[in-house]
Amino acid sequence: MVNVIMHGCSGKMGNMITEICRDDDDINIVAGISAVEDNTKDYPVFTSISECNVDADVIIDFSAAAAVDSLLSYCDEKKMPVVLCTTGLSEDQLSKVNDISKRVAVLKSANMSLGINMLFNLLKEATKILAPAGFDVEIVEKHHNLKLDAPSGTALALADSVNEAADNAYEYVYDRSQVRQKRDKKELGISAVRGGTIVGDHEVIFAGTDEVITFKHTAYSKAVFAKGAIQAAKFLKGKGAGMYDMQDVVLK
């Protein structure tokens, strides 16, 4: 049994993870953290992580960037493993994440879905073949109109997979509206669309002369991310200090 603290338990992902865990005999949410009072859960809910006095094996975090600093301090103090799913973190916060991973097990992933994490590997193989052949690379991501950060963390992770396979030769371009010039061969364009209730849609385009190859992943429900986070929590229980990602879960 894996005992979990759900950080961000009143959000959409927190509620979904709560529901899924109720039907999973291998995992149990023992406490939750919510910015607002929440009396709907069958576990105790605290309005601050610092107030939580419940023992657990791991924390699952689906909150907001503003709440991550206190979470990291708590995990460092308690030596509590954490599945860190919140996106839009600042450079300073990312530095803190790397720092505490020297003392605590941290699993951070821009996207918790199995399909996306398989796509990371496929893109690396495609880039090795298509980039030397002169194919341009563009990424288009689409999300619901309530998403705060742009581009998505997943889009950036997909771009990083391409760039890693190309020996970091690409420069990311987010806006071409202020320039009037031909596209540079080493540009990697990343475009963000926000509208409606789109759960998550990521398209990686390799555009060559007279042919286009497209890799696309579409999430139809947030359940794919919730299930991935739960699998990650099970994986992280008992792990030593270090930085982990979903590739470790997928390839274990």
Image: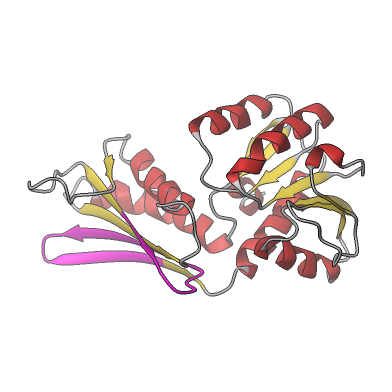
Q: Residue at x 53, y 40 (%)?
A: 89
User: The N terminus is located in which quarter?
Assistant: bottom right
Q: Residue at x 85, y 44 (%)?
A: 57
Which is the main secondary structure of the residues drawn in magenta?
strand
Query: Looking at this rendering, what residue extends furthest in the front direction?
Result: 37
Q: Residue at x 61, y 67 (%)?
A: 224
21 to the left or right of 152? right
**Residue 238, picture quadrant:** top right
217 to the left or right of 52? left
Residue closer to the observer: 97 or 133: 97
Q: Which coloring applies here?
A: secondary structure
Q: Is any atom of residue 160 visible in this view?
A: yes
Q: Is any atom of residue 240 visible in this view?
A: no
Residue 22 on image: x %, y %: 85, 69
89 to the left or right of 52? left
Residue closer to the observer: 22 or 13: 13
152 to the left or right of 33? left
**Residue 66, picture quadrant:** top right
* Relative height, residue 173 to residue 240 (above, below): below
Residue 160 on image: x %, y %: 40, 43
Residue 176 on image: x %, y %: 19, 49
Q: Is residue 69 magenta?
A: no
Query: Looking at this rendering, what residue extends furthest in the left direction?
Result: 181
Q: Residue at x 73, y 25 (%)?
A: 103
Residue 140 on image: x %, y %: 33, 60
Q: Which residues are magenta?
A: 191-216
**Residue 97, picture quadrant:** top right
Q: Is residue 210 magenta?
A: yes
Give the total number of marks visible in the rendering.
Answer: 0
